[in-house]
Image (cartoon, rainbow, N blue to C red):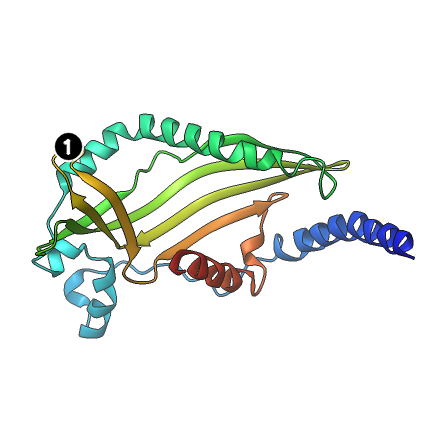
Amino acid sequence: MELVCSILELIGIVIGFPVGLLLGYFLFIYFEPGDVKEPMVRPLHEFDTSSIADLLPDIPLWMKQPDYDRLDWLNKSIYHMWPYLDKAICNAIRSSLEPIFGEYIGKYLLKSIEFEFLSLGTLPPTIQGMKVHETNENEVAFEPMLRWAGNPNIILVVKLLALRIKIQLIDIQIFAAPRIILKPLVPTIPCFASIVVSLMEKPYVDFGLKVLGGDIMAIPGLYQFVQVLLFLTLMF
């Protein structure tokens, strides 16, 4: 009986997985939303009070709060270093994930999992402002406001039996305000013993995820599920 159940389970996976992908492809790729409106461009003096208030979240913190410092010099440095940082970060991602992918080869009918292309794009993250806390403890605490509206191109190829499935990550947006604490301070380089990173509020994370050429994040309910999953992963 167990053998029969195993065979039926295998048949269900082989048939159901590609059928589900094809149905999702045809249902959610070729149906574009009809309520998309063209953006309106107007001078700032024409906005009313409520409209200006809606724009406040997009204004850098150093313009709204005097205890946040402006870091244009650091953003310029990151911009010029980004082509090299991109390659270094991508190499680190490859070296850390490829051994994990290798553990799944041969399981769940998987033949291979590999990166076809891996780049974080040409747009670097920016620091919209940074606040340094004054404490009586033997530590340094600061809060950078990070924003990244990037154009990465990460293509992962999964070979499942005779199927070759491309998964592509594009158009990522991350807004976060972590608190970074260096403690305790010590008299030897790098002058601190540990780094503690915590999130003071829920970060904003959005991205496009294409499978077989279509953005699966357009599937109703999937975007909300991913947001909840990311929140639980980051906050706990």
Count neighbours of disc 1 (C-alpha within 10 A) and say few if under 14, some if 14 to 19, many if 20 or more: few
In the image, residue 4 above or below residue 150: below
Q: Element under label 1? A: loop
Where is the C terminus found, in terms of image quarters?
Answer: bottom left
Left or right placement of residue 113 versus residue 14 in this view = left
Residue at image position (75%, 48%) is 18
Name the quarter where the N terminus is drawn.
Answer: bottom right
x 37%, y 42%: residue: 150
The residue located at (23%, 70%) in the rendering is 51
Q: Position of residue 86 (x, y in %)?
A: 36, 30
Who is closer to the viewer here, 30 or 210? 210
Question: In the displayed structure, would residue 76 be above or below residue 230?
Answer: above
Q: Position of residue 84 (x, y in %)?
A: 32, 25
Q: Picture coordinates of residue 7 (x, y %)?
A: 87, 50
Front in this rendered view, residue 2 or 46: 2
Residue occupied by mark 1? 188
Question: Residue 126, position in %: x, y?
Answer: 25, 43
Along the line of sight, which residue is nearer the eye, 160 or 167?
Answer: 160
Residue type indicated by callout 1: Thr
Q: Quadrant of residue 81?
A: top left
Residue at image coords 42%, 54%: 206
Q: Is residue 114 above or below residue 146?
A: above
Q: In which quadrant of the rendered view does residue 190 lie?
A: top left
